[in-house]
Amino acid sequence: MARVLIVDDNQAMVEALSIVVSARGHDALTALSGEEALRLIASEMLDVVLLDLTMPGLDGFETLDRLRTMPEGKDLPVLIITALDEEDLEDRVAEAGGNALLRKPVDVNRLADQIEVHTASTA
């Protein structure tokens, strides 16, 4: 079982992703902002983060940049989940340190596969 942090400012999306993550046997923690996510990353043992890009305050890229400077976040797998459809987004996510890009609406099977791939060494 992996401990998965879900970060999105949309409460309905957080709840939906939590259901999917929990149904696959994982422990879901949630944050509604980048700031809250960084606090949880510093205090919780996590296996993977699902991170939205478009949030008020710290957006996903800023959150990712900050978590990569933290000892707890340096090697933590981060799966970016977004509705953005920019041409170079996959490259930008990789350059920023994201491990995978998933587009909304999220394919739950692909999400589950990505969680498994990125937590296989910690299970």
Image (tube, rainbow, N blue to C red):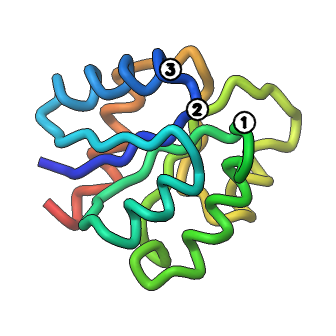
Mark 1 or 3: the one toward you: 1
Q: Quadrant of residue 113?
A: top left
Residue 54 in the figure: left or right of residue 70 = right
Q: Residue at x 24, y 67 (%)?
A: 45
Which comes before the other along the chain, label 1 or label 2?
2
Is 52 situated above or below 12?
below
The answer to whether the residues at label 3 and label 2 have Cβ atoms under 8 Å apart is no
Identity of the amino acid at label 1? Thr
- Residue 9 is tagged as 2
Residue 106's label in the rendered image is 3
In the foreground, 63 or 99: 63
CB within 8 Å, label 1 to label 2? yes
Q: Amino acid at mark 2?
A: Asp
The percent coordinates of residue 39 (x first, y second) are 44, 64
Question: The residue tagged with tag 2: helix, strand or loop?
Answer: loop
Q: How many marks?
A: 3
Residue 1 as seen in the image, left or right of residue 48: left
Q: Nearer the viewer, mark 1 or mark 2?
A: 2
